[in-house]
Structure formats: C-alpha cells, structure tokens
Amino acid sequence: MRNWLLVFYCLVALLSGAYAQQGWPPVYDIKTDTSMLTLDTTYFQILEDRSGELSFDQVRRNTSFYHGSFFDSHRRSHVYWLRMRVRNTLPDTLNLYLCDFSGSYLDLYWQNAKQQWIHERTGVLIPKSQLTKQNQAERSRLFFQLLPGQQTTLYQRSASAFWDGPILYLSPKLQTKTHRANEVYTAMQVKEGWQNDYFSGITLGILVLAVCYNLLIFFSVNDRVYLYFSVCLFFFILDRNVGQIQSIFFAEQPDLFAFARSFFFIIFFTFFIQSIRKFIQPSDKFRYLNRMISIALLLTVLANVALFFRVSFPLIPIYTTTILLEIQIRITYIFLITLIVKMMNEGSTDARFALLATTPLLIFWLYTLTTNILGYFFKINFRPYVGSSLDYGEGVCFAWLIIVFSAALLNRYSLARKQVVQQAIEKEQLEKEREIEKNRLIANQNELLEKQVEERTSQLKTSLENLKATQNQLIQQEKMASLGELTAGIAHEIQNPLNFVNNFSEVSIELVDELNEERAKDSNRDVELESELLQDLNQNLQKISLHGKRASNIVKGMLEHSRKSTGEREPTDLNALADEYLRLAYHGLRAKDKSFNATLSTDFDKSVDNVSIVAQDVGRVLLNLFTNAFYAVQQRQKIQKEPGYQPTVSITTRCENKQAIIRVSDNGTGMPKSVQKKIFQPFFTTKPTGEGTGLGLSLSYDIITKGHNGTITVESTEGQGTTFTITLPT
C-alpha cells in the first residue's frame, strides 16, 4: 500500500512540475540601455496559431504556451505568438524597440503604466498608408516605453506570407532607441554606409541603361540574344533591389510585389541561359546536349514552382527543397558550361567570351552549394571563417558575368555592323554590275525600238492629225450650230423692223405722189392739205429711221458675235447680255417652228454691276443654255401633251458674297441622276443623232471654270425641269 501511495505522490509531483513549466516565464530585467538585448529561451514562451485567426483575448486566455528553441525546422505555422515579461531596473525611462527580423508582419500588445493594453503594428507587407509615420520608417521594430522600475507583459505576434513558408526562427530582441540611433549613425557615417547606397544607385542606373541599350540594339538588328539579355538584366535588377523598388513603386501593394518577387530569380536565370545559348549558337552536332539543357531548365522552373507551394504540400522538409532547387540550378549551369566548352573546341570565338563570363559564378555556386549541404546535413558551419566576404562574392561574380557578357555582346554588335557594311558594299557592287548589264541590254533594245518607234510615230502622227481634224470639225459644227441658232433668231428679230421700213416706205411714196398731184394744180392748190401731207411724210421718215437703226443694231450685234474673241475681259452689263441672248434664242427656235410659244420670265438684280468678262464667250454659254432650255420645254410639249402645260424659261441674276449668280431654269423634261453626272463630258448628248454634237455644255464648262474662274452646276428633276447655276467672281 505504501508503494502505491509513493507512486501516486510521484505522479502528482511530476504533473505539478509540468504545470509549472506551462506557467509564466520569469521576468527579464533590463540593466543596460546601450546594446541590443536578445532574450534567452527561458524568458519567452511560444504559441502556435495554425489558423492565424486567434484574437488577442483568446491568446491571453490560452494555456498552450510553451518554451521552445530559437530555431526549429519542424515548425509548420505561418503565425506564432510570443509572450514575455520585462522590467526596467534603470533609474531612467527606457524608450525601447521590440525587434523581429523573421516575419513579414509584427504586432505588439503591451501594458503601459496605467495597466492599459496598447497595440502597435508594422511589417514589410503592410501598405504604407496603414502605418503610422514612425512605423513607416521601421518595418521590423515596434516602439514602447518603460518607466523606472516598471514591469510590463509583452505579447508579440509574428506572421509570414504563405509563399514565404513557415517561421522557423523565433528570437525576440529588445533595442533601446539610443542604441538604434547610434547604430544608424555608425552604419551611415563611421562605416560610410552611405557610400554603399551611392554606388548601389550608380550600379542600378548603369544596369537600367544596359537594359535600354540592349533593347535598342535588338530593334536595330533583330537579334533575339539582345532581347533575352535585356529581360535577364531587368529581372536581375528587380531581384537585387527588392527593398528599394517595393518602397518606391509598390508602397501600397507590397504583398503583390512580394508575391511576384518569388519568381524574379528563376526568370532571370531562364533568360540568362537562353541568352548564352543564343549567343554561342550551338551547332546541330550538339543538339542532344542542347536538349538536355532545355529539359534541365524546365525542371529548374518546376522546382521553383514546387518550392513556392512547398508549404501547402510539406512532403519534403522546406530547407531540403531549397537545397534540391540549388542542386538543380547548378546542374543546368554545368550543362551550359559543358556546351560552351564544346563549342569553344569547335573554334567558336563567342564561346570563349561566354566561358570567361560564366566560370567565376559556377565556381562560387559550387562552393556555396557545398557549404550549404555541409551546414545543413553535417552541421559544419564555414560562416565564421569566410565572414562577410561571402555576401560580396556572389555580387562580384554577377558583376563580372554582366560586364564580360555585355562586352561580348558589344563586340558581336560591332562585328555585325561591319558585316552589314560589307554586305552593303557587296550589294552595291553587284547592283552596279547589274546596272551596267542592264544598260547594255537597254542600248541594244533601244536601237530596235527606235526603228519601231519611227514607224509607229508616223502612223500616230497621221492618226493624230485626223483626230484633230475631226475634233476641229466637231467644234466648228457646234459653233456653227450655235451660230445657226443665233442667225435664225437674228433673222426673225430683224424681220420686224424691215417690215416697218417697207410699210412706211410704201405709204411715204403714196404721200409724195399725192403731194405732187396737189402741187400740179395751179389755182386750186390746197395749202393745208400739202402741209398735212408733208407732216405725215416727215413722221413716216422718222419711223423708217427708227426701225432702220434698230435693224442696224441687230446686224452690229450679229457681227460682234461672229467676230473672233480676243480673250480680253471687259466690264459688261450682265443683265442686258442675258436678256439679249434669251430673246435671240427664243426667236431662233420660233424661226424654225412658228407654232411654238413660251413664257419668258426675267428677274434681274439691279445690284449686279458691270462684270469683267469676255462677253462673246459668256454670251455663247448663255445662248447654249437658253437653246437647251427651249428645246427641253418644246420636247415636253410635243411628247407629253399635258393639258394646261405652259412652256416657261426663266433667267435670274443675283449678287451674293462678291459673286454674280446666273440661274437659267425651265420646266421641261428634266434629267435623271445618271445623265446629270455626265452632262459636262465632251461628246455626251441627250439629243437624237444629228441634232447635237455633245460639245456645247463641255465648251460652256471650260469657258466658265477655266476662262473665268467660276462654277457651273446643274440641278434637275426628271419630268419637272432643270436649273443651271453659273457663278462668276465680280
């Protein structure tokens, strides 16, 4: 029985000890304000938050906190809570930072002197606008304050993004504000850290110029090696300047940029491999090795994708996956170096440049892979022996690779330009030889062609003369037709004054005979009768003189129309000219058809002053338009025989916008749209064969547009009438 009681008390003691271990950690006393304080694992406890959804109140009530080591490769959560207690043992107020350099998000809950819980938040993946001004500058530190002798409880929440993997290293650090200021000053001034930023800026600028320059060469020579190298440099810049680029361009989308940066290096590596292969141009002899490089490169990309999603499928330890990716990268690189060496043995100068550029990086990568494998699997750490030189080694190798390969590309571009110039010279010489041969053939053909040309020229001259003669005949025919219309009108017009002259002459002869008979009477002469006869005779002679002058004016007008135009413009009464040719055209048609009658409508604008024109030419145009108008109304009257139809031709003049406008309208047969488009074309006519030459409106168009810088247009509705509008500058 005593043995069982002893076992029971032992179990109670063990459970009590276990419970005591789950209690609060001891208080950490701060005894200095001049250094970075790292809390030992004794002074903080860890709580795993797999869901990442625990609130602060839930965490405070949680009893699952435990003591753990700084580094644990078996951790699988992205969110961990740490709790600790600290006390200020110094006589002055302490301004402290809680530091966390392993997570992407950092939250701090602490009690101030009034026992109030204060919450502070910062992190590299939090948008800038969501942080206070102080936390914008410090993305891995949160500020809190301890009065002399004050003790407080700290809850630290550290979280990482899902693509960054779980947090394996947890180590709370405390740093005084004074120590932080001295640290920054020492880094920037004493150790001249500003020089690193200065030279980093210069290097970044040079790389950006290299990207632009290679793109410019690519568009110039269309060689894809320059495009591949430009993309390679671009993603190298992104991969090596993540912090600066994120803070400047992605301050409000840091998570998006951080997500993308996981692929920057593999994109850089892919395009680098492609640019080297394109540069050395491997022959078909090494197609299998070239294919192996493609397969290895594809596997490298897939391994990088697998590394990105390793958290969701933790089949292999995370660090092991990283080591495997590094091995795959080195294998691809070794395949590439092997291809370069083989091409160099084939005598490729480009391969020598490529080997010179890539060898240092291969050596460095093999060294880092060896140290990583020894450190992870065999716990052999070479870091204390190499110090910070390892950090600069890779940068130096990359700089060497970029500089040497850029020089090789410049040399390639120079050779390409020389080759282009040489090809241009050869092409020019070949073109000259072809030109000489072409000239010789042309000279031989010219002799043969000259004979054929002479024969055909004589034939063409004969044909041209016949054509000109025919054209002159047609134009003369049109002029004669116009003159015939004018002559008929003049003959009809002159008939009236001649009839008056004849009639008054006969009456005057009778009066003279009667006067002579009266004078023959000696004693019975009637003086009053003689006076009346003389007075009637005088009136008759005046009538004869009046109508004679009228006939003379008509003849004079006919002579002016028949006289050849000098082409000189003279001020002309446009209204009088239009009225005269309207009546001449009307009487010309009536001379042919006594039964034809039409209404002549005139609307002359008195503001139309004398216009500078060639009167004979414009008169010929008006006569042609009037003749066509009378022909149209006559045809409608004859063909359609509409009851109540009254043929009407009207003339209107206006002065608008420093232009004289003449409108000739009729209510004749009109024209369809198809005819209106061709009405001013030479030799086009709507009249039956033998009644028109088709040159009247064509000549009228040339007289108005070319001879007087005016316009002539037509508007017509089939079956209703036509209006021609002439505009002449005043």
Image (cartoon, rainbow, N blue to C red):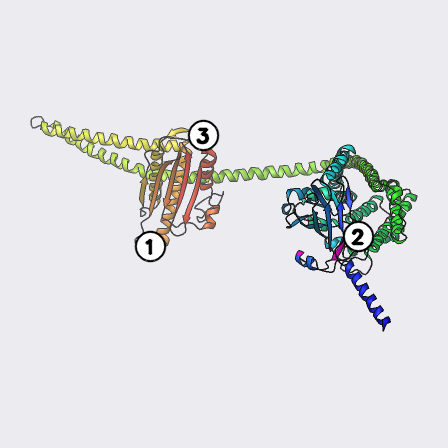
The disc placed on residue 243 is none
What amino acid type is highlighted by mark number 1? Glu
- Please determine whether, in this image, residue 262 is positioned above or below residue 176: below
| Badge 3 density bin: few <14, some 14–19, many ≥20, Cα 10 Å | few
Evaluate if marks 3 and 1 touch, with contact meaning CB atoms under 8 Å apart: no
Q: Which of 98 and 276 is in front in this view?
A: 98
Q: Is residue 165 left or right of residue 727?
A: right
Position of residue 150 in the picture relative to residue 337 (left or right) = left
Are the residues flagged by discs 1 and 2 in contact, CB closer than 8 Å?
Answer: no
Dot 1: element = loop
Cα separation between marks 1 and 2: 125 Å
Could one spot residue 648 in this view of the protein?
Answer: yes
For the point 28% across and 30% down, which residue is it?
A: 549
Q: Which residue bears the numbered disc 1? A: 642
Percent coordinates x, y for residue 86 in the rendering = 73, 48
Residue at the spot of label 3:
567
- Which span of residues is magenta-colored? 40-56
State which tag comes first along the sequence, 3 or 1: 3
Q: Please tell me which of labels 2 and 3 falls first in the chain.
A: 2
Q: Inspect the image, locate mark 2, and give the three-letter code of the amino acid beneath it.
A: Thr
Q: Look at the numbered disc 2 and give the secondary structure of its residue.
A: helix
The N terminus lies in which quarter of the figure?
Answer: bottom right
Q: Looking at this rendering, what residue extends furthest in the top direction?
A: 522
Q: Which amino acid does the dot numbered 3 rest on? A: Gly
Counting from the top left corner in percent of width and height, residue 409 is at: 81, 39
If the image is split into quadrants, where does the C terminus sit?
top left
Looking at the image, which residue sits at the far left?
Answer: 523
Identity of the residue drawn at 76% across and 48% down? 28
Give me the disc on residue 42.
Answer: 2
Q: Position of residue 79 (x, y in %)?
A: 73, 55
Q: How far apart are marks 2 and 3 (CA)?
A: 120 Å
When the figure is inspected, residue 70 is found, relative to residue 545, above or below; the finding is: below
